[in-house]
Amino acid sequence: MKCMKCNERAVIRMRQHRLALCKDHYIEWFVQQTQRFIEKYHMFTRDEKVLVAVSGGKDSLALWDVLWQLGYHAEGLYINLGIDEGLHYSNESERLAREFAEQRGLVLHVINVEQAHGETVPEIARRTRRGRDKPCAVCGLIKRHDMNQAALELGFNVLATAHNLDDEVAFLFGNVFHWNLEQMRRQAPILPESPGFARKVKPFCRFSERETAAYSLVRGIAYIEDECPFAEGSKQLLYKDLLNRLEEVEPGAKLRFYLGFIEARDSGQLVLPREEEVPLELHPCPRCGQPTTSPGLCAYCRLFERESLEASETQRPSG
Ligand code: SF4
Ligand code: ZN
Ligand code: ZN
């Protein structure tokens, strides 16, 4: 298989794009495509500072690497969740994120949940009803809150995450499958900023996982190869598997599904009815200051209100 630009040996063949490229042309293509997506969806400009949410995995380190190569002012944010499960998952991913930043002279901000709250994410989750079996819902809440707060406190109005096409398509598939209209309304390559919320952007949302992995590989990026141990058996992984099987028989199916949805919704062809026409009233949480619809503390701060949490847990209706 030959590179379609220079005839050297190709390192990747992308059936959905009808393209095969050598190492150098693949890096060039990948970086240029990212720039194209940033411009197409008006994600950010060169005058804006971007905070990249870094997990130590292939996607987030690849995103930071590409933004660095493109000359953006991009700093990293790593949240140590305290997940160990015999794999030293969090400490090892923090080590790789720090190593990546040091090699390139980039700034990495680190939040350690255990140091901040005296408990790891799995420990916090175990105290709650919804996190007793699996910490993912609580973990997601903590990550979203800490990322947004860090972005605002550090003076970034743009927060970039490395969700790729496979993540987005699996999420969309799950939302369609369960008719989760509220999530379908909010799923987009960019969520504009609003008072108290940084702009959220996903510059990799049109790259498949295979493409981001290939980029990390050819760039020699050392990343954590293990998945979070709690991801095993998740619906998201099941959907990814199903969609990959579909992609095998119908190359480009994932991209068409995702882009078709975004275009239909944004052009008004697909109208998602609103359950609640009244705009949500947001006010600052009295403890952390972040916007919340709840009359008292926000959902994040309530996680650390042990007494009220235990009371609400014992009061839940039976049956
Ligand atoms: Fe958090 Fe791991 Fe669950 Fe992801 S899989 S939400 S990192 S606990
Ligand atoms: Zn080439
Ligand atoms: Zn709060």
Image (spheres, helix red, strand yellow):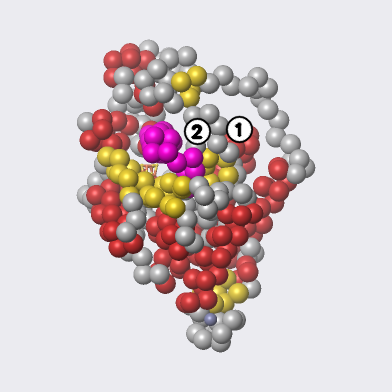
Residue range in magenta is 141-160
Q: Which mark is residue 197?
A: 2
- The amino acid beneath tag 1 is Glu
Q: Quadrant of residue 192?
A: top right
Quadrant hosting ligand 1: top left
In the image, 114: left or right of 258? left
Q: What's the residue type where badge 2 is placed?
A: Phe
Q: Which mark sits nearer the N-terminus, 2 or 1? A: 1
Q: Position of residue 176 (x, y in %)?
A: 62, 41
Residue located farthest toward the right when viewing the structure as drawn: 269
- The residue lying furthest to the front in this view is 47
Give the class, few, some or many, for how many residues have Cα within 10 Å of label 2's Cα (few <14, many ≥20).
Answer: some
User: Could you say which disc has been placed on residue 182 in the image?
Assistant: 1
In the rendered image of this protein, does residue 272 appear above or below residue 259?
above
Kind of element beneath mark 2 = loop
Q: Which mark is residue 77?
A: none
Q: Verify whether residue 151 appears in magenta.
A: yes
- Can you give x and y, in whole percent of width and height, for residue 302 in the image? 36, 21
**Left or right of residue 161: residue 83:** left
**Secondary structure at numbered mark 1:** helix
| Residue 213 shows in the view | no
* Residue 140 versus residue 61 in the image, above or below: above
Residue at 24% of width from left, 36% of height from top? 114
Q: Nearer the viewer, residue 131 or 26?
A: 26
Above/below status of 315 relative to 62: above
Give the alpha-carbon distance from disc 2 to disc 1, as whole Å: 18 Å
Q: Residues within 10 Å of mark 1 (few under 14, many from 20)?
A: few
Rendered location of residue 255, percent (x, y):
62, 57
Magenta-span inclusion, residue 192:
no
Tell me what residue is drawn at x 24 percent, y 46 percent: 84
